[in-house]
Image: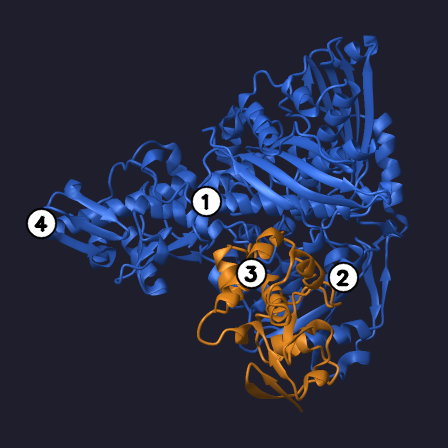
Chain colours: A blue, B orange
Amino acid sequence: MAGIKLTRRKFLIAGAVIGGGLAIGYALKKNEPENAALSSTTGEGEIALNAWIKVDADGQVTVAIPRTEMGQGVYTSLAMLVAEELDADFETIKVEQAPIAAVYANVIAVQDALTPLSNEYHEGEETIVGSAMGSVGRLLGVQATGGSASVRDAWTPMRHAGATARALLVKAAAKSWGVPAEDCIVEDGIISHVASGKSSGFGAFIMQAAEETLPTSVSLKSESQFKLIGQPQQRIDIPEKVVGAANFGIDIDLPDMAYAAVTLCPVPGGTLTSHDADAVKNMPGVLKVVPFETGVAVIADSFWRAKTAAEALLVTFDEGETASFSTASAMKTLLGNLQTGDARSYADEGDTLAVLEEAENKVEGQYEAPYLAHACLEPMNCTAKVTENAVEVWMPNQAPTLVKWFAAQVADVPSENVTVHTTLVGGGFGRRLEIDLMVMAVTIAKALPNRPVKLLWTRELDTQHDMYRPAAVAKFEVALTQDGKIDAWYNRQVSQSVSGSFTARLLPWATLDVPDTTTSQGAADLPYEFANELMEHVPVKLPVPVGYWRSVGHSMNGFFTEAFMDEVAAKAGQDPIDFRLAHLSNHPDFVNALKKVAEVSNWQVPLTAGRGRGVALHQSFGSIVAQVAEVTVDNDKNVSVDKVYCVVDCGLAVNPDTVSAQMEGGIIFGLSAAFYGDITIEEGRVINENFPDYDMVRLANVPEIEVHILQSGRPMGGIGEPGTPPIAPAVTSAIFAVTGERVRSLPISKMGYTA
Amino acid sequence: MIHLNINGKPYELDVEDDTPLLWVLRDTVRLTGTKFGCGVAACGACTVHVDGEPVRSCSFSVIDAVGSKITTIEGLATDELTAVQQAWIDEQVPQCGYCQSGMIMAVSAMLVENPTPSDEDINETITNICRCGTYPRIRKAIHRAAKMQGGN
């Protein structure tokens, strides 16, 4: 509906036609729904409730969710925000995927991604720079799910949506009963007027509510009035996921649908030079062979037949310049830039280099992190149907706005003729912010017009054609005072830029060399109070496509900085927790998290021989997480992570059970990386193929995890990513506690440890 | 033509003998609850029951299922949810949910063989991958389901 100016009445009718019910919306600013997001900046009474809430004649409430459900529980938590203020019956509430519209832009995610110097943990979204970027986010109108931002971003508009709809319904009920609206109460979807004994569900008033004038202002509940928010709610999407009824992108089933499988050039940037279509044309079910720039697709009447034919094709590629590239050579480039090369400073306090020059007591360390794949369990897929002047896309994706913009380009149709269906996602972790599958699917579907074509990659293609978490190296040098505190902290890092790589994929004409949060986050914004601090980063260009991977820059910086803090604590002869506390005098929230994790983990109580603890503290996406890992290491360097204690301070926890689940999942995601994650490239191609050589934690080596949620009252933070960064340093420090050996390069197998 | 019995229903299907059962279920019979994860029997997302035995259907030729009773996630519950499915809801196990069909099928088969599995039994038997990391809840849900079944 974006781009079409609808009057309120027309909008309501459209809602009724489309949904079989009535969409209650408010449009402000002269009834321009697409401008609604701007209204939050224009003062009280002008905020738009747009297409968030539908109610039918039976009182059924349906909430439109503008974010992607990829397991992080966003269908439930965003529905809770609406239901809380609407006083709806949460047990019966339904959700549906919202369409694409500017009003649904994820302002906070865009703001965080584009704000090069945002100081997340102190000011968060309140920074001046942050606000300015927030405006940019609104203008860009990018609807995306990422940056652990969904609940923070929806917090105000979706509660307003609920409150405004409630006010309209109450007004209508009061008018129909001839009673004052302020004497009516709403509970579990029932409006009541106690004195007259009148009582009815929402459904009886939806037509009248639609005619009511919008309230000039609505008041939102205070925290003490919340009934749903802050209480664990069962996830709305779980019942269908236990009976096999949940529809992921791979499950799309359309009339007359065909299936596509591809053979791709194994080297990124390489191109197809020849293929012999005749060899497979007569194989069972084969409909068409479609060559494109980087490979060949076979379209058939089932995926298996398409795949069998695609593998039987004789193809040759020009592998291009990257064919001699390897991760070994990449590591040399990264390490070379650790010593020389222009760096960009992200934190610069005091006179760090001068203090280090003079210092007598110094500690140094050098760390490495590998390339990592996302390995979403649902393999990459996209279904596309191209007709003469339109394209329809069904895709498990995290960025429908980007899918829409670029589908229009690939299919060469007007943007308004693109329909994007965002399905449930079988794991996202940042991989599905990319549009490569859409581009490939639409390209292939153009060769078979008027039929939906489902493109599916194999696991091998997923592993070998990812946009990887960049490899990175870091060196540290600190000066210790006589009483064993850090006086100067120097950290130099080298890696590719994630946002640079991502932007270059979308906009190849854009040459961006600008400061980049994705490289420095979690290293330039440490909570520790150092009188002198210099954090600098050298962005290097390498032919590996890199992308957003759960917790992005924090995923390596959390390991580097916290593993090194542990190292300095040991050199200073201090307890790792006491050492950190000594550098956090003005950061009470961090102190609380550390003290809490010390308490719940019985930090002071020694473990038996062969067992040890490690701690890590890291803030990301507005939330503070402290973890203690308890490990056992035997004489053959077999590591067992027995238990992880996790303390999270994310401000108000909207759905506490989801916060716990995301901490558990984030820890295990980080453990898989710490144990096994290592993408290796030789002769330009990724040599890892599938789970046997890109392994995952399983039940047999998963620790017991105990999550504690702090209620500090600090501003709300995200929860999808912050659980991941601290686990690797907690584990490597625990290994040190047992063995006295530092793991400075991940995965731990590089140091001969097995998990 | 290949004749199969899936969830108690007979099917006559035009597929090659060596087609993996997974793709027959998903693309030919259109039962999409069974998932494709790796294609090499490494992740277990495609687990179904063939005569009650857990089978990784991505690596199991359809011809080998002829004459057997095939049960998929869609056919696991008849009127009401099984104890395993209910335990999955009670413990709020799934995140993205993609692996959970296979997990539930693998666990359901294990509990038939071993109604009261120890943690070690679980570790040895359930080797499926969950990329979201729902394992701690899976473990709790298995024990809960075992208890529920024992109580019936």
Pointer 2 chain: A
User: In the rendered structure, which disc, 2 or 1, sits on the residue that comes first in sequence?
Assistant: 2
Judging by the rendered image, the residue that carries numbered circle 2 is: A460
Q: Give the residue type at disc 2.
A: Glu
Q: Reply above or below: B106 against A357.
A: below
- Same chain? Circles 4 and 3: yes
Q: Which mark is residue A655?
A: 1
Mark 4–mark 1 distance (CA, rounded to whole Å): 36 Å
Q: Quadrant of the N terminus of chain A?
A: bottom left
Is disc 1 surrounded by few (<14), some (14 to 19) or many (20+) residues within 10 Å?
Answer: many
Judging by the rendered image, the residue that carries numbered circle 4 is: A196
Judging by the rendered image, the residue that carries numbered circle 3 is: A413
> Is residue A514 in view from this perspective?
no
Residue furthest to the bottom: B1
- SS assignment at label 2: helix
- SS assignment at label 1: loop
